[in-house]
Image (cartoon, rainbow, N blue to C red):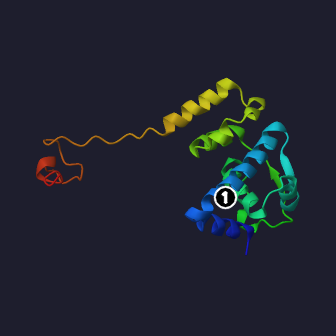
Amino acid sequence: MSLFKEWNELINNQTDDTFEAFWKEYAGTEQRIYQKILAIYPEHLKGTFDELVKEFDANKVIFMGFMDGINSSLKKENDLESVTEDTALDFDIDYEKLFFNMLKADADYLYTLQEWENVLTVDKMKEIVKDYNRSKIVHVEKKPGRNEPCPCGSGKKYKNCCGKNA
């Protein structure tokens, strides 16, 4: 079974009894990795999957979960299904996208890391937060008035067509 499939099984089979311990291990591992990634900026985190698991004293399946989480923030995503212990990895990160994605995941334990100060300016972080907040705004289409033409295209007034039972 691939490491990615093992990760999906682990995450999808959590119970109320196991979730807290799982989350503590996952979040702790993720935080250690991101602290290093941000501290070595602008260098990339590199190594084989197995070397990086050892460097961060991580469970290999949890490390795959980290890879799943960061994948959409990489300049070139990894094919997670094909990753093995021997796969060479180079995390070429789009840091602005990573910060945005951390906001989106509500990962305050990550986007508030002090190490971000080495990577993005305070103004840039504020701009990304503003963009993120704007992205959450949902514009609801205005319901047509009773005497307006029905949006279904029937040619009838809304009140005599789709609005009849509304």
Residue 117 against residue 111 in the figure, above or below: above
Q: For the residue marked with disc 1, what is the amino acid?
A: Ala
For disc 1, the marked residue is 21
Residue 164 in the image: state x and y as whole percent. Answer: 13, 53
Q: In this view, which residue lies farthest toward the top?
A: 123
Q: Depth check: give the residue in front, 93 or 155.
A: 93
Q: Quadrant of residue 144?
A: top left
Residue farthest along the left direction in this orientation: 160
* Towards the viewer: 47 or 153: 47
Q: Residue at x 78, y 30 (%)?
A: 118
Instruction: Describe the element under mark 1 as helix, strand or loop.
Output: helix
Report the residue at 85% width, 55% height from top: 52
Total marks placed: 1
Q: Give left or right: position of 164 versus 122.
A: left
Percent position of residue 61, x then y: 74, 64
Which quarter of the figure is the N terminus placed in?
A: bottom right
At 13% from the left and 41% from the top, the residue drawn is 147
